[in-house]
Structures are given as structure tokens and as C-alpha cells.
Image (cartoon, rainbow, N blue to C red):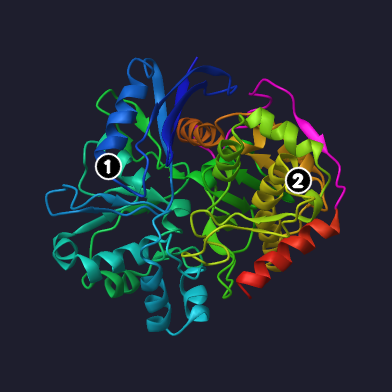
Amino acid sequence: MALVAGVDSSTQSVKIVVRDADSGALVREARASHPDGTEVDPAAWVSALAAASDGLLDGVSAMAIGGQQHGMVALDDEGEVVRDALLWNDTRSAPDADDLIAELGGPQAWADAVGSVPVAAFTVTKVRWMARVEPENAARTSRVLLPHDYLTWLLAGRPDEAATDRGEASGTGYWSPITGEYRTDLLEMALGHDARLPHVHGPASAIGETKAGILLGPGTGDNMAAALGIGAGPGDVVVSLGTSGTAFAVSDVPAKDPSGLVAGFADATGHFLPLVCTLNAARVLSSTAAMLNVDLDQLATLAMAAAPGAGGLSLLPYLDGERTPNLPTAQGSLHGLTRDNMTPENLARAAVEGMLGGLADAVDALVEVGVEPRRVILVGGAAANPAVGAVASTLFTVPVVVPPAGEYVADGAARQAAWVLAGGGEPPVWDDVREGETRMYQPDPVAAVRQAYGRARGALYPA
């Protein structure tokens, strides 16, 4: 039995799954925590990966890493880290995004160049922030990698040329999924000089080996790995509820949205992955639970005890600013508060509806660029909350599916590793690799919920 390993190096932790390469059956798994924050020493990821993989990779033939997108890892001529990595959720580069958009000629110019209009999350804006605020560090930077690129590069023994894939490269703001080429002029515009970038490999390419002789795949971004792990197909819109919230769909054509709502990413299989990202997802529920002094199961009970619409109470959940809409300095707010609706039940319901309201808007934005949803698949930590699927059915107009909880990013990375091992034009098919119940909810939309959310957003942040 050949074994493969998939790694999810996320914002909060690293998760590793070891699966049978042919069937996908889970053999073993492990995890370790990452430090909190929006600025992290990459050494912390290395230590966590080493701790989680200790004794876990015996007998593994191939592995790949799915990692948090966009983070900037700046290296000097010796391959040493210049400064702590800036993560996707660090919003200090918001003004730099505005400057870069203007310098290229506006949003349409960016959409045409790289398929996406940069926001604070994108690597190119963080590079510009470093050049503006820390020019000495920018001058020392000779190579720019993303988090998963950096880990793969280390595992491969720090080769002269680093490796990445289309999915991860498409989130930088200086690689175009439309042409399949880097726009090095955009990186140079941001950094002030050129820098070495990882080679963009095909999805089933072997890019090297670890010291232990484990074959390495190119890896990919976390959303791309999740799509591969779920096996998303035409008509599937995946809504992922982790630290961030994302809505994405596999497409045969690249997206070019000058509004900036939809990022025109590539996927991990050679197709495209139009995606909308919000900054606020699972933490909206955990923060509300903490405020109400209940656990997440109790929060679900409270939310389900309230009627749709939470008695007129709406939560704008911009607790950490927001990426979509692009409001990096925004704050959260409650709307429609009265003595009658000021109950724990309504607040719990408003938290779930608020978290999902922005993602329902995200699905609408995907429809605007040509996606035709036939179902919504809810994954991620918050999807396990029993209230989330039921509330989602009141916001979406297509069936909602909540598959068994799982490490879908790590599973997608493992599936890529199995693809590298087997070769061929398509990834291996893994059926029924997770235990547990799949929950399904038929659409029961309540228009008033979306309308109240839209009024609350429009009152504070007009379009």
C-alpha cells in the first residue's frame, strides 16, 4: 500500500493527513498550533510542521502542502528571512493597494493584467508596504515566496529554484492565470527592484524530494486544495467557513472582475477558481459565544430558538475590518436593536445570519461573473455548528450540503501527492473517504433576512 501525506499549513495551525494513495483511506493524522497574529516568524511554521510530522511520515511515498494564500515571505541573497511574514489578514497595506491600482491605470487595468484587483490581502500590496515603510528590508529582499512555497522549498533542501503552482501564484497580484505568466513588472513596481520568484509547475509535477526521499508535489493555496479535497465539480459553489470566509467555484474560463469583488484565481487542476473572500467567518461565532458566556453548541441552540431575521436584529460582522466589500478599517455593528429583540437568542441568530450574509452576497457576485450554482457546499470549522446549515437554507436559493467534518485542505494536498505519484491527466478518484453524516437542507429563502443585512451594510458603508 502506497501512502501519501497532505499538509494544511493554515493561519492558526498545521494539519497533516496520511492516506492510502489508491483508495484515499485515512491512515493517521496529526496537528500542531501556529502563533496568533497577522505577522509571524516563518520559523514558527517550520517548528509546527516538524512537531506534527514527527514519526507520522514513515512509509510515505509522496507529499504536498496546501497553505494560507497571499502571505509575504521575503528572503535575502543567502535565503534567510528578511522580516516576519505578513499574512493575508494583515490590513496595513490597504493604502498601498489603492496606490498600486492608481499607478497601473485603475481596476480594469489590474483585472485585465492578472484577473484580480489587488486588496490588502494580496502579496503585491504587502511588498509595496515593505518598500514604503521598511526600505532597508525591501533593498535586502532578493526572493519573494508565499508560505507554502517557503515550506516546500525548505523540505526540498533549499534548491536554487523554488516551486509553486498556478493556484498559489494567482493570489500574488503579479502572476496572471489569463496568460500563465508572471507580470514581473508589477512586482518591480511594488518592490522597487526585481526579485526571484518560484517556478510555476503543473498540478501533477514532482518538484523534488525531502531528505527522507519523499517525493514532493508543487502544493497549492488553501482554497485550491480544499476544492481538490472536496472534489468540487461544475455547479458546486464551496463556501468555506474558517478564520476567513470564502465562496468559490471551479470554472473553465478565467474571471476578470474590475469591481474587485471576485478574485480571478486559478485552481489546482489546470482550471480556474473565481473566488470571493471575507475576513470574518468562524470567529464571528466564537466571539459571540464568548460574549454570551456560552459554548458553540449552546450558541447553536440559542440561534435555532429565534425566528429567521432575529426579530429585526442584524449584525454587520466586520470584526477585523473586511476584505469583501473592501473595507479594511471597518468595524462590526448591531442594527435594529430594540427592547423586544434584545435577547440572547436573537443575538445568536443575528451572528449566524451576519456571518452568512456576506457570503450569500459573495455567491451573488460569482453568479455575476458566470457561475451557475446548483448547490452550496459548506465546509470549514464553523460549518460543523448545527445552526449554520439550517440558517444557510434561509439565505441561499439552492440546496445546501454540509459534508462530514474533515481536513479538506490537507486532503486536497494529499490527493495532489497521489496524483504526482500516479501521473496521468486527472487526479485520482477517492470515494467516501470520510466517516460521518452528510446533512442536506432544501432552500427556504427568507427575503427579509438578506434585505435587512443589505440595509445595515448600506447605512454605514454605501456601495
Q: CA distance from mark 1 to mark 2?
A: 36 Å
In the displayed structure image, the side of residue 36 where residue 313 appears, left or right: right
Q: Which residues are magenta?
A: 422-445
Residue at position x 60%, y 22% in the image: 23
- Viewed as shown, does residue 351 lie left or right of 244? right
Assess whether mark 2 and mark 1 are in contact (beta carbons under 8 angstroms).
Answer: no
Disc assigned to residue 136: none
The quarter of the picture where residue 287 lies is top right
Q: Could you say which disc has been placed on residue 42 in the image?
A: 1
Where does residue 4 sit, x and y in percent of width and height?
46, 25
Q: Quadrant of residue 457?
A: bottom right
Q: Which mark is residue 392?
A: 2
Does dot 1 land on a helix, a strand or a loop? Answer: helix
Above or below, 267 against 213 in this view is: below
| Depth check, front residue: 381 or 220 | 381
Q: Nearer the viewer, mark 1 or mark 2?
A: 2
User: x%, y% of residue 273?
Assistant: 58, 55
Q: Is residue 427 magenta?
A: yes
Q: Residue at x 43, y 50 (%)?
A: 69
Q: Position of residue 230 (x, y in %)?
A: 63, 37
